[in-house]
Every structure is written in structure tokens, then in C-alpha cells.
Amino acid sequence: MFVKPQKIIFHTLLQKIKLDSIKPRQTNLNIELINQLKIEIRQNGLLCPLVIHNNKTLLDGHHRYEYLKRNDIDKSIE
């Protein structure tokens, strides 16, 4: 179901930030997808970074964010 990225083009734009500083904006989440991500992230790690605006608003990766948050993964993420 998930495709592993081959190359990150904008590697210079990646930053590490704390999960608790991110402001998600999507409220209707698919619990089944979050459970699938649980298996994928445990096996392969977080392959696709979250996309976050300069003001810390989450633009893409709401289900990945929710998995990380629910599992108390409070480390800085890329």
C-alpha cells in the first residue's frame, strides 16, 4: 500500500521540530489508516516527512502525525 521514497529532492528544507509545536488542522482521521501506519512505521521508520508551514501548521501527514502523537513519540522529527 505504501511506496518507499527513492530520493528526497528538497533535503535542504528539512528541519527537526518538536511534535508538540505542530498545529494540525484536519479533524476527521481514518483510524484504520493510523493502525496500518503503526505497522509500517515500526517496520520501516518514518519514510515520508511531515509537511509543515512556517507558522507550524501541519499541511500534509495528519495520519502520520496522529500515530506519532498517540504513541508518545515526542522526539524531534524530520
Image: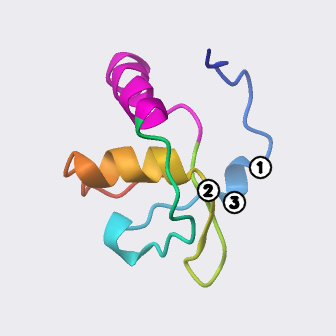
Q: Are marks 3 and 2 in contact (CB under 8 Å)?
A: yes
Q: Residues in magenta?
A: 32-48
Is 2 within the magenta? no
Type of secondary structure dominating the magenta stretch: helix
Above or below residue 21? Residue 32 is above
Q: Residue at x 41, y 39 (%)?
A: 31
Q: For mark 3, does the 10 Å Cα neighbourhood hold few (<14), some (14 to 19), or many (20 or more) residues? A: few
33 relative to 42 in the view: left or right: right
Q: For mark 2, does the 10 Å Cα neighbourhood hold few (<14), some (14 to 19), or many (20 or more) residues? A: some
Depth check: give the residue in front, 61 or 52: 61
Query: In this figure, which residue is indicated by the disc labeled 3?
Result: 13
Q: Are marks 3 and 1 in contact (CB under 8 Å)?
A: yes
Which circle marks residue 43 in the picture?
Answer: none
Above or below residue 22? Residue 65 is above
Q: Tally the numbered discs.
A: 3
Query: In this figure, which residue is indicated by the disc labeled 2?
Result: 14
Question: For the residue marked with disc 1, what is the amino acid?
Answer: Phe
Element under disc 1: loop
Q: Residue at x 65, y 80 (%)?
A: 54
Alpha-carbon span between mark 3 and mark 1: 6 Å
Q: Are marks 1 and 2 in contact (CB under 8 Å)?
A: yes
Question: For the residue marked with disc 2, what is the amino acid?
Answer: Leu
Q: Position of residue 71 (x, y in %)?
A: 22, 45
Element under disc 2: loop
Query: In this figure, which residue is indicated by the disc labeled 1?
Result: 10
Question: For the residue marked with disc 3, what is the amino acid?
Answer: Leu
53 relative to 44 in the view: left or right: right
Task: Work out which quarter of the rendered image holds the N terminus and state it.
Answer: top right
Colouring scheme, one of rainbow, by chain, secondary structure, one colour: rainbow
Alpha-carbon span between mark 3 and mark 2: 4 Å
